[in-house]
Amino acid sequence: MAISRPHPLQLISADEVTKASAIVRSIAEKQGVAIGTKSGLRFKNISLHDPPKALLLPYLDAEAAGVPAADRPFVPRLILAIWSYDRESRVVESVVSLDSGTEVAQSQTAKGQHGSIDRVEVRDSQQRMLEDPLVIEAIAKLNLPPGTIVQSDPWMYGADRNSNKDTHKFMQALLYARAPDNHPDSNQYAFPLPISPLYDIFEDKVVEITKLATGGQEDGLAYDTASDKPMAHCQANEYHPDLLPPARTDLKPLHVIQPEGPSFTITEENCVSWQKWRFRVGFNYREGMTVHDVRYDGRPVFYRLSVSEMTVPYGDPRSPFHRKQAFDLGDAGAGSTANCLSLGCDCLGSIAYFSGYLNDEEGAPVKAENVICLHEQDGGVGWKHTNFRTRNPSIARARNLILQTIITVGNYEYIFAWCFMQNGNVELETRATGILSTALIDPGKTSEWGNVVNPGVLAPNHQHLFSLRVDPMLDGARNSVFYEDSIAVPYSEEENPHGNAWRVVKTPFETSGFVDADPFANRVIKMVNETKRNPISGNPVGYKLVPQPCQLILAGENSVVRKRAKFAEHHVWVTKYRDGDLWAGGKWTNQSLSEVDGVFDYAARNEKVRNEDVVVWLTFGMTHNPRVEDFPVMPSEISTISLKPADFFDRNPALDVPQSRQEVNKSVLVSDPLPTASKMVGGGDECCDVKSKP
C-alpha cells in the first residue's frame, strides 16, 4: 500500500515542526552544542523550505495535467530550521529532509551577521530593560507623576558608520509612559520618554542609557534643551474605543450575504480554486503569506508571488534616531508578527481562514491561528457598453477574490491583500496603518525632521519601501522581460506631418539589471513568453505591470542606511532565477552594514535573462511626512500594484461573467425597507440601468 505524502506545497504541520526540531537537536548535539542550558541550543524559526524548482515544477505540471499524485515525480519534503547557541553569537540554518530524517544543507552567519529578532528575544529584552536598576534610576530623574507605568518598544539596533563586524547583537528600547489613568490600552505614543536603554543580547545586560535630543529647529543637533520635567506638557490622545467618547450612531449595518455560500473551493488544506483561477497558499515565518503555482484556466501564469522585504528608514539625523531603520521581514518576520484574524472585523462576508505553525525556543510547534483570510468582494462594474442606437446596455459586475494577511510590527500595522480578478488581473494592495513611532519635543518647538502631532509629540519623517517578488511562468518557465515606453514621434512631413503620432518602443532585458519608473513615458514592464504568440495580435503572450513612480530611498549614496537597502535604489530589477534567491535586502538584515546576497548582488551577476527562467522585483511604497491626522492612529495609506494580461488571451476573458441582473442582486430603493417585486427597478430580468438617449 502506497504511503500518502503531503503535497510539496502543503502548509507545515505541527508534527513536521516536531520532527524537524528533533533532527536539528541531534545535529546540534553531535556538534557539541549544549542542550537545555541558558547559552545552549535555541530554536528561532522553523518553516517549510521551498523544494528545488527543477524538481517541483515538473510535479506541478503533472498535477495540472491530471496525473495522480502517486505517479508524479518525487519531491522531497524539506524544512528550514534556524537555530542559535552561545547567546545568539552563533546562528545556524539547517535544511532537513523529513523523508530521510537527515540534514541536507547547513550554513552559518558570517562575522558581523546577526539572526533576526525572534519573539522570545523581544519578550526577554523588554523585561530586562525595564527591570534594570540603571534604567529605573534614569526614569526617576524624569520627575514623572507618581504611579506612572513605563512601557518599552524594543527596536532593532540598526547600523551606522561607527558599526563594525565585531558589533554584538543589540536591542534599542524606545520608552513611553501610559496616560495618567493607566488603562492597559492607553496610547503610550503620546508620552515618549527622552531616554533609550541599549541591551546587549550576547552579554544579557543593559550596556548603555542614551539621552535623546528633544530640541527643535533652533537647537540643531543639541541635547539637554528640556527642563527638569521634560514631559510635563504631554497630553493624552487616545484611539481605543474604551477611552473615546461614544461612537457615531448614524451608521447603518452593511451585511455581505452569500445565500448559496462562496464561489471558491479549498482542497488539500491550501489549494484554492475560484472562477478560472487555481493557486496554493503558503505561509512562513519571514514572508508570511506567499502564493504558489498560479494558473488561469489551466494555463501557468506565476510560479511564486511574495513580498520579499520592506525597509523603513527614518530621517532624524540626531543619534540614536539616525540608526532607526527597520527591515520588518528580515529583522522580525511577517509570519512571526501575523495577526489572528477575526470574523466580522478584518474582512466581511463568507470567510475561509488558513492557519500555520511557528515554534517556540524549544522547537515545539506554536499554532498561528487564522493568519490568512480568503473571501469574495464585489468589484464594481467589470465591463459595460450601452449601444446608443438600440439603447440596450450590457453590463457585468466584477467579483474579486481577496487573500489577506495583517502583521503588527511594534507600532505599525501592514495589511497585504492579493486580489484575483475574473478578467485575469492580479493586484497586490498594501495598506499601512497603526501608530506613528514618536519622540519627545520641547514645548512650543517644531522640527525639520518631522511634524508635531500632539503636545510634546514629534512624529519623525520616514519611508516605507517594499519589494514585491514576481516569479513568472507564462505558458512555461522560460520568459523574457521588456520595458515599454510610449514616445512621441518628432514632427516631420515624411512620418508625422500632423504631430499627433507616438511610437511604442520595446527594450528587452538581455542581461540582469534594473530600470526605473517613468510616468512621462508611460513605462510598463512586460513579462512575456517569446516562444508563444497571441493568435490575434501576433505578439508574445504576456503580463504587464506598471512600476509605481514612488520616491526611492532618500538616504545619501554613501550612507550605511542606503548601503543596507540597495534594492530601494531602483524601481524594477530583473534577475535570473536561482533557488534561494528570495531576499531583496539580503538574508541577514539585522544590524547589516550593507546589502549582502540581496537583489543588487543577484543582478550584478550579469546573467543572461532573455528567454530564461527570470524573476522580476518591484520596489514600491511611500515617503511618509506625518500629518496631525495620522495621530493617534493612522488612517490606512494604500498602495496598489497591478499585474495585467497583455495579449495573453484572445479576447476579454471576463466576457462569460454573468450579466448583472436585479433578479440576482436584489437591490432596493432607499425608500424601501425590503425588496419587493413591485418596486424592483427594471423588473426581474432586465438590467437596472437608465437607457441613454439616441
Image (spheres, helix red, strand yellow):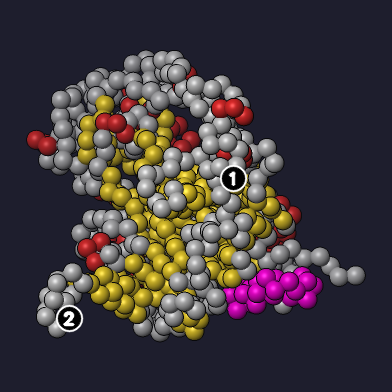
Residue 18 lies within the magenta run: no
In this rendering, does residue 360 appear at all? no
State the residue position of label 1.
375
Q: Magenta span covers which residues?
A: 47-72
Residue at disc 1, secondary structure:
strand
**Which part of the image, by quadrant, shows the N terminus?**
bottom right
The residue depicted at 18 percent of the width and 69 percent of the height is 500
Lateral position of residue 498 relative to residue 2, left or right: left
| Extreme-left residue of the structure | 218
Residue at disc 2, secondary structure:
loop
- Judge whether 187 appears above or below 165 on screen: above
State the residue position of label 2.
495
Dividing the picture into quarters, in which one does residue 206 lie? top left
Circle 1 Cα neighbour tier, 10 Å, few/some/many (<14 / 14–19 / ≥20): many
Identify which amino acid the numbered label 1 is placed on.
Answer: His
Residue 52 lies within the magenta run: yes
